[in-house]
Amino acid sequence: MNKEERLIKRYKAEKRFQFYGKAAIFMALLFLVVFLTKIFSTGYTAFQKTWLVIPVNYNADLLYLDPDKKPTTEDINDADFYEFGIETFITLDPDASEDQIMELKKMFAFTFERELKYYLLDNPDSFGKTVDVKLTASDDLDQVFKGNYPRDIPENRRRASDYQLKIFDKLNEDGRVISEFNASFFTNADSREAELAGIASSFMGSLFSILVCLSIAFPVALLAAVYLEEFAPKNRFTDFIEVNINNLAAVPSIVFGLLGLGVLLAVFGLPRSTPLVGGITLSLMTLPTIIIAARASLKAVPPSIREAALAMGASKMQTTMHHTVPLALPGTLSGTIIGLAQALGETAPLILIGMVAFVNTIPGTPMDPAASLPVQIYIWAESAERGFVEKVSACIMVLLFFLIFMNLGAQLIRHKFEKKWN
Amino acid sequence: MNSVIFLTIVLLALSSYFFGRKKAILIQSNKRLTALPKFYGYYLAIWCGAPAFLLYALWSIFEPSIVRFFILSDYSSQGLLEGELNLFYEKVKSLSRNQYSGELTAELQRSAEKYLNFRDITKWSKVVIVLSLLIASTGYAYTKISNNTKTREPVEIFLKGVFFLSSLAAILTTIGIIFSLLFQTIEFFQVIPLFDFVFGMHWYPAKAFVRDASEALDPSMYSDTFGAVPIFAGTFFIALIAMCVAIPIGLLSGIYMAEYASKRLRQYAKPVIEILAGIPTVVYGFFAALTVGPFLKDLGLSLGLEVSAESALAAGGVMGIMIIPFISSLSDDVITSVPQNLRDGSYAMGATKSETIKRVIIPAALPGIVGSILLGVSRAIGETMIVVMASGLAANLTLNPLESTSTITAQIVVILIGDQQFGDPKTQAAFALGLSLFIVTLVLNIVALSVVKKYREKYE
């Protein structure tokens, strides 16, 4: 091999190496893109909800009410809307057999009783008349309408029967199947029925956990950072604290779950499954992150600031509290937000302290049992129904939205309020 | 009741700030103060709040066990087991809240009445004692305030003490972790020999289902149920798969970012790659279970391979994607901090850029790169949700990436999800696994951090 050839070979190796680097970056970005597209393409349909608009005859006889008198709220509340609903469904297909009536009923979410009742309560004038009422479709039909269920497979492998599809198609031709923004996804608590399940309970659970976490972790971490950076003597004990903090930052999150279970629940007897315990556990986990961020921004405050304050006769404490800490606050806050974003996405420790319970009420205080958004994702993902797949993706979208929002907020604080010392 | 006491203390402390300051201002009108008036306020507020709060906190911590001791002292002579005493005490408590639905006995009723009585006494004596301490300490401090009282120094010392206590939180957390893990683990090893746990080949905790306390002491039941070898092997195997994805991609993109990338690319691509690290792991788990698992299964079918829908490959591969940014960012930092004169020297000898990177920069940055990889490994070992959702939960001892395996973290979740019974070897096994996880990651982190630190010292 002569010199020329060797040079060509070396240049080729150079090109190859650069290509590998580009390919690696491309791969990493590709993963992100594939990942986000997948989540968005499966999830966006969950923000739509399918309704069936059917003619309902609020006939007094069917409701066993007095036809001559306008029913009071109590009358309506006492009336039997289950039988009434069934009678109404039969009008969709007057020739339906017993089994087919059951199938007709299953085309609707099991809340049809309540929906029929509330319609009458909201529109008392429709008593005795036939009106169009919007009822939630069952999740099987919802999925069919959104195109998530294949229709061309044999009937026994399908969730929606041929009969249901026939009725559904007839309704669809009449323009009686409508799709609207799914507000109940944001206002409902969890449910076993995919068409009714919402994120309100887990959202509140997450909110409470994060608030508890913030109110514990932020003050403790800030004060600890101030002590270590400004007051601590240089000795073995201080080093020991530092080593502890660095190691805690890298302890797997599930170990904090074991800590919460073994100490907070078993020793202190705090209530299981509550955002209070979840928040405390998460705060122990976030503590090192915030301490490290706060120390970094305290360190970045130039010594001249401290010296100037001291020269004016301020005490060490006054210097710290009036000058150093306020200057370090933007960095600390942005570190805190990033730590909270981590805590918001954490699942494993919350599962261990029991925040994985099925909660179908919206928690009002941090002492009520609750799930959290990531745990909700886990619960729904483990559920077999197809209707939950889009819910999971939608829940992920909500969670990612908050995470992006928090991270952008942290960036903004850092860029806007942090002083650059040069 | 507790929150009322707490709020009262806080409110009284706040108001005593104003009293203290006002007294100082009055004194100021004819004498010179040694500190600003607000320090007199802080001084009084601390004297008002701190002792009362301390007593209140200690009382609240020790009250339950004192009440328990008092109630159970009647029965301690009967030679009951600890568990029976506990059960009895729980019954007494639920009876006193009117939530008891079991069989009522005379002694139960008597104890419940005694319990309620005692709770009443402690509650009111707590209020009285805490408040009188508060008044006494505030009064003492108030009379002490005069123009030459030192107030700034004590206030600052107090604050410094609070700061110091906050910094102990990290140590307390570590102690809490070690305490909770070790305590349960030791109990576990009293039933299961350490040797069986570390070298046993079968992991099947569902077998160790305990119906009542007498069975729990029979060790023969647990033979061959708590052998952790398949779990440890699975953990390292999945971590290995993850690193096979993360090391090449992470390292190469780190190198490219540090050495080749234009400023613009670096500015945009780096944060975007770091998004991968910010995505919650449960989301990765869902992605692995919903997309990657079935995709690999179909791919395997078309190649004529048997691939489990919950394969180690799916979990490990997705975990690798998650770890890419840890390795790329850290190795980027490490490579950027290699001194420029090493590069210049190599270029001067006629080396191309890639030759410089391969022969000069990487060897120089090697400790840092190794450190970043070790941190990545520790992440992979501690990762939970991806494995729980995407890989199997049955602990197979296998080296086939197409089959399902389980990890330490996944087993902890499997055992502890739902209601746990403390004192059950199954629950304790989870803590034993947790302790092994803690030790392994701790060692990895210490090694990684010390390697990185040593490397930094070399070039700074």
Image (cartoon, rainbow, N blue to C red):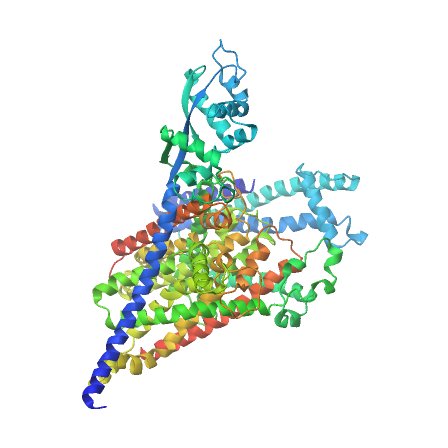
Locate the C terminus of chain B by quadrant: bottom left
Furthest residue toward top:
A68
Given residues A86 and B183, the one toward you in this image is A86
Given residues A370 and A212, the one toward you in this image is A370
User: Does residue B273 appear to the left or right of B188 in the view shown?
Assistant: left
Vertical comparison of B115 with B216: above or below: above
Q: Is residue A43 visible?
A: yes
Q: At x 46% / y 70%, what residue is drawn? A: B240
Given residues B405 and B46, the one toward you in this image is B405
Given residues B45 and B330, the one toward you in this image is B330
Q: At x 54% / y 20%, what residue is drawn? A: A79
Q: Position of residue B266 (x, y in %)?
A: 25, 65
Q: Position of residue A108 (x, y in %)?
A: 47, 32
Q: Is residue B13 visible?
A: no
Furthest residue toward left:
A4
Q: Position of residue B418 (x, y in %)?
A: 58, 50
Q: Position of residue A183 (x, y in %)?
A: 39, 36
Name the quadrant containing residue B361. bottom left
Q: At x 61% / y 50%, what residue is drawn? A: B419
Locate the N terminus of chain B by quadrant: top right
Vertical comparison of A225 with B86: above or below: below
